[in-house]
Image: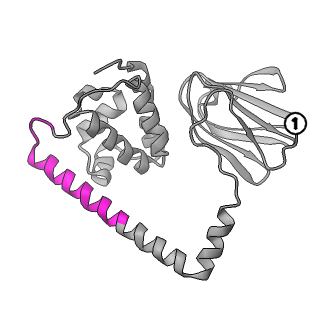
Amino acid sequence: MVNFNTEVAVQLGEFLRKKREERKVNLEKASEATFISPLYLDALEKGEWGRLPGKAYASGYLKIYSRFLGVDPQEVLALFNRAYGGGEEKISLVPEKISGKQKKNILRFLMVTFAILVVAFVFILISYRLPIFSELNREEKTVPIVEETIPPEEVLPTPQATPGFSVVVVLEPESLSWSEVRSGDRVVFSGILVPGKRYVFKSNGPIEISGKDGDRVKVNLNGKDLGYLASENGDFEQTFGP
């Protein structure tokens, strides 16, 4: 592997394990639902990607597993690529030896993917032919969309925001943490907070933040250091006002 970051791999694996345990599902049940071998799921959760058939298979397994756990696959894959340092690597898409069970898993994966694509295609056709769906499509285009991947220093204004903000919240995660940020009735951010990035939220009204592992996320309100989002590990919910 080229420029492989073991720390990122281990943190991502730990995050996936916690999400699975939150759903009260063991590796065997997760394997049955995703058609991925329990040994490979164990390797993903421990950040030991060298035990997987190859990089291409690892990214595919992560995408399937993250969907099963209710985590955004694009955020997980972004962390996966970050672990490899963005370096290019020549990869054989087929491992040297593929067992009969692996072949069955691959065939099932392809069949499920094909079925999902067919259903999505039919839904798109119906949505553009029915007036009610057309109206919904037009309304959705007017709603602002928040970037899924947030670069450092990016500001996420809420619908109530004006040039003079009365509430400015800055989050600085020390490890991977799942959080949701709301202002009024709108969710302005929902996803994984990544170490090494600063997340800035500005509004003229209260900002509500909930999630897990708040004891690993530093928070600053209007320039004042408030310590961490939570005093201990587990679920948390905080509201920040003017």
Mark 1: secondary structure = loop
Q: Is residue 34 visible?
A: yes
Instruction: Give the quadrant of residue 242.
Output: top right
Q: Measuring 16% from the left and 46% from the top, which residue is drawn there? A: 102
Q: Position of residue 228 (x, y in %)?
A: 70, 24
**Left or right: where 38 falls relative to 67:** left
Where residue 139 sits, quadrant-wise, is bottom right
Q: What residue is drawn where x is 53% and y is 29%?
A: 176
- For the rendered model, the colour scheme is one colour
Give the magenta part as a residue range.
Answer: 95-117
- Residue 110 percent across, percent down from the top left: 25, 57
Say which residue label 1 marks: 165
The chief SS type of the magenta part is helix
Residue 203, image quadrant: top right
Q: Is residue 218 left or right of residue 76?
A: right
- The three-letter amino acid code for the residue at tag 1 is Phe
- Vertical placement of 100 versus 238: above or below? below
* Residue in the foreground of this view, choosing between 18 and 220: 220
Residue 181 placement (x, y as % from top left): 69, 42
Magenta stretch contains residue 97: yes
**Residue drawn at x 61%, y 75% as measured from the top left:** 134
Q: Residues within 10 Å of mark 1 (few under 14, many from 20)?
A: some
Across and down, in percent, residue 178 comes to 57, 37
Q: Which residue is located at x 48 percent, y 45 percent? A: 71
Assign the N terminus to one quadrant of the image: top left
Q: For residue 13, say whether it is visible.
A: no
Q: Is residue 26 left or right of residue 146?
A: left
Q: State the count of labels.
A: 1
Is residue 108 one of those drawn in magenta?
A: yes
